[in-house]
Image (cartoon, rainbow, N blue to C red):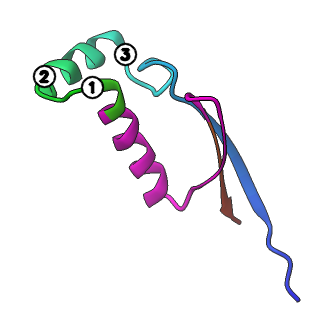
Amino acid sequence: MSANNWEYKIVDHSNSTAMGYSNEATEKFKIEHKNAHNWKYVMSTIELNKLGQEGWEIAAVNGADQIYLKRPI
């Protein structure tokens, strides 16, 4: 039996700044995705997909905005 070693990350998707966007970048994103029903959902999905490509997977969710991720080390 082998033990997995993990590293963990908590991400906050409560607002665009927490996701790493400046106010200017957020406004640009809103313009580029003006036809989206919910621009914040689109932004959050894009950011989660980036983390997934880096090997992170969701371990738990605390409410709608706080996401706990893990990946093997």
- From the viewer's perspective, is the residue at label 1 or at label 3 nearer? 1
- Neighbourhood count class around disc 1 (C-alpha, 10 Å): few under 14, some 14–19, many 20 upward: some
Q: Which residue is mark 1?
A: 39
Q: Which residue is mark 2?
A: 34
Residue 62 or residue 56, whichever sits in front: 62
* Residue 3 percent across, percent down from the top left: 86, 77
Residue at (73, 55) in percent of width and height = 7
* Residue 35 percent across, percent down from the top left: 11, 27
Up the image or down, 56 lies above or below 73; here it is above
Q: Which residue is mark 3?
A: 22
Up the image or down, 69 lies above or below 10; here it is below
Three-letter code, disc 1 = Trp
Residue 59 or residue 26, whichever sits in front: 59
Up the image or down, 61 lies above or below 19; here it is below
State the separation of the CA atoms marked 2 and 1. 7 Å
Q: Are marks 2 and 3 in contact (CB under 8 Å)?
A: no
Q: Which of the 4 image quadrants contains residue 10? A: top right
Q: Are marks 2 and 1 in contact (CB under 8 Å)?
A: yes
Horizontally, residue 27 falls left or right of residue 73, namely left
* Residue 43 percent across, percent down from the top left: 33, 32
Residue at (63, 29) in percent of width and height = 63
* Residue bounds of the magenta highlight: 42-66
What is the number of callouts on the image? 3
Three-letter code, disc 3 = Ser
Quarter of the picture holding the N terminus = bottom right
Three-letter code, disc 2 = Lys
Q: Are marks 1 and 3 in contact (CB under 8 Å)?
A: no
- From the viewer's perspective, is the residue at label 2 or at label 3 nearer? 2
Q: Secondary structure at mark 1?
A: helix
State the separation of the CA atoms marked 2 and 3. 18 Å
The answer to if 64 sits in the magenta stretch is yes
